[in-house]
Amino acid sequence: MSVSSLSARVSRRPRPAWARGQTVTALIARDWRITRSYRGALVSDLAFGCLNLVAYYYISRTVKVSVHADLDGAPSYFAFAAVGVALSVVLQAAIIGVSTRLREEQLTGTLEALCAQPISAWELALGLAGFPFLFAVFRAFAYLLIAGALLGLDFSRCAWAGLVGAFLVTGLALGAVGVCLAALVLVFKRANSVGAIGTFGMSLLGGALFPASVLPHFLRPLAAIVPTRFAFSAARAALFGRPGWPESILDLAGIGIALGAISIVLFTLALRHAVSRGTLNQY
């Protein structure tokens, strides 16, 4: 029996909600065990972000930022950039995480076996994206806490509920872009470069490492509507005690709901296309 016929037969069996949740958590737990087995890579990932923070700390002490630049309430350029460095980790995981994991499943020959199981497209997408996203949120908060403990980042006015909400909603909203990218991988096999360019562009326009006010005038209208702008604004407003972070989070959540619906439809169609053509494991 072919994988496509097996998948079609099994996927029609009704499954309770708890079983669907178990599928997602099982994939997340599997990826955690794999990552934990490579301790050197795990430590290097954490160390790289810390080195980024140190670099921007000394840049902040060396270069004077214009008083006309809007730093989203940050007391210094380092405080502004620290949020950008931390949140960019979540953005990268959300946008590139699903496609990277999907690509690894293709290379190891396990994607076909996964799709032969009674799981839906959204379960597969959430299961593959779950661990990269959760680990990225952990890394992001670790970087901020290290910046506070060693480099003087001030948390005295932080609204912790807003900061946590901003990071989580950012990952969920931008994760929809990652699912769309994974659909491209299923159809065209290689699309990670598109994700890398997209992540860089959205971080640049959203104000990860410098204010949007210093962008060329023709880019500012685009910077005003890119989803990452709401993400960085919400996180900085919550951390530096400014009003407005609930509105930014709600705007980002609305974008995420719309993109999420579109992404699941695209991923389902791409998965069906790959199953029907027998190209799931081609790379």
Image (cartoon, helix red, strand yellow):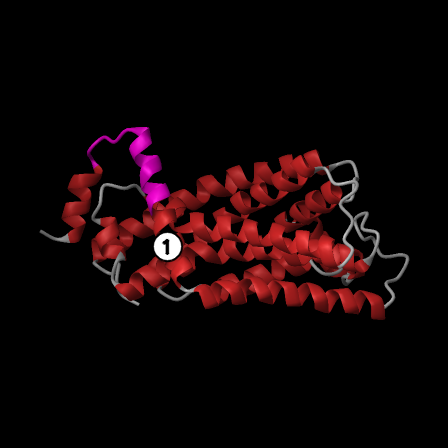
Helix, strand or loop: magenta stretch: helix
Determine the image quadrant of residue 274. Answer: bottom left
Question: Would residue 129 appear left or right of 117 to someone viewing this image?
Answer: right
Q: Residue at x 22, y 45 (%)?
A: 117
Q: How many numbered circles does the render carry?
A: 1
Category of crowding for the residue at label 1, using alpha-carbon neighbours closer than 10 angstroms: few (below 14), some (14–19), many (at least 20): few
Determine the image quadrant of residue 146. Answer: bottom right
Q: Is residue 238 above or below residue 3?
A: above
Q: Is residue 190 above or below residue 120?
A: below
What kind of element bears circle 1?
A: helix
The residue positioned farthest toward the left in the image shown: 1
Which residue lies under the disc numbered 1? 33
Magenta residue span: 12-26
Most foreground residue, 160 or 260: 160
Q: Residue at x 54, y 47 (%)?
A: 171
Q: Position of residue 30 (x, y in %)?
A: 34, 51
Question: Would residue 89 appear left or right of 39 to someone viewing this image?
Answer: right
Determine the image quadrant of residue 56. Answer: bottom right
Q: Position of residue 40 (x, y in %)?
A: 47, 68
Q: Is residue 167 visible?
A: yes
Q: Residue at x 15, y 46 (%)?
A: 6
Most foreground residue, 59 or 113: 59
